[in-house]
Image (cartoon, rainbow, N blue to C red):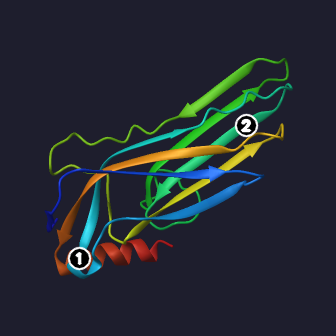
Amino acid sequence: MAIKKTSQLLNIGSSILFSDGDVNKNERKSLPLNSLDREVFVVTDISIDSDPLIIPQLPGQDVSINFSVNKNEITVQTINNPDCVSHFRKQVTTTPVGDTVQISAYPSEASTGISQDYLGIIATSDYVLCGSYASTGGGDPDRRCYVRLTGYRAQATADVYAALVAEELSSN
């Protein structure tokens, strides 16, 4: 691909807050890119975490967070969607007999570290955090999901930049 690295590795942190009955939420986050210079952000690694979930008090209840980092989509996507950079899911359920089961799917998205390897390329000057938070027990306190994108800025040739931007915008 015709892109040239223009920065050292950058760590970009962001988060999204679920509060007061938020079920589905999305927020756009800015990237330090210059579109006039055809800059893109090459994602090499990503980490996602969340505040701990409350263990439901009654049998048969559950609490869950389903979350994704997307290039442009404003709904939660799974990693099989080209627009999705990473997906995260955490769920705590109590069984009808009162046992507690926790299911977690943490991202294992990390490159090999060589300069030709990357997880994705974000061509527009922002990305989207999308999540859904659900509780059948009600009354849960605010919860936050945290993201750290690691990557570098790069300059793309005009044709590659146009193709990357068109791909991102057409996926919405």
Q: In this rendering, would 156 be left or right of 17? A: left
Relative height, residue 6 to residue 148 (above, below)? below
Whichever of callouts 1 and 2 sits on the residue coming sooner in the sequence is 1
- Residue positioned 41% across, 60% down in the render: 82
Residue under label 1, please give it.
Answer: 38
- Residue positioned 37% across, 42% down in the render: 109
Residue type at mark 2 is Val
| Closest to the observer, 9 or 97 | 9
Secondary structure of the residue carrying numbered label 1: loop
- Residue positioned 86% across, 26% down in the render: 58
Residue 110: x, y in percent? 31, 41
Residue count near mark 1 (Cα–Cα under 10 Å), binned few <14, some 14–19, many ≥20? many
Residue under label 2, please give it.
Answer: 63
Q: Quadrant of the N terminus?
A: bottom left
Secondary structure of the residue carrying numbered label 2: strand
Q: Quarter of the image holding residue 112?
A: top left
Residue type at mark 1 is Arg
Q: In this rendering, would 158 be left or right of 89? A: left
Residue count near mark 2 (Cα–Cα under 10 Å), binned few <14, some 14–19, many ≥20? many
Q: Quarter of the image holding residue 96?
A: top right
Residue 5: x, y in percent? 15, 61
- Residue positioned 61% across, 30% down in the render: 103
How many badges with numbers are in the image?
Answer: 2
Q: CA distance from mark 1 to mark 2?
A: 42 Å
Relative height, residue 141 to residue 154 (above, below)? above
Relative height, residue 62 to residue 84 (above, below)? above
Residue 150: x, y in percent? 31, 49
Relative height, residue 34 to residue 99 (above, below)? below
| Closest to the observer, 21 or 60 | 21
Residue 144: x, y in percent? 60, 45
Mark linked to residue 74 = none
| Closest to the observer, 39 or 60 | 39
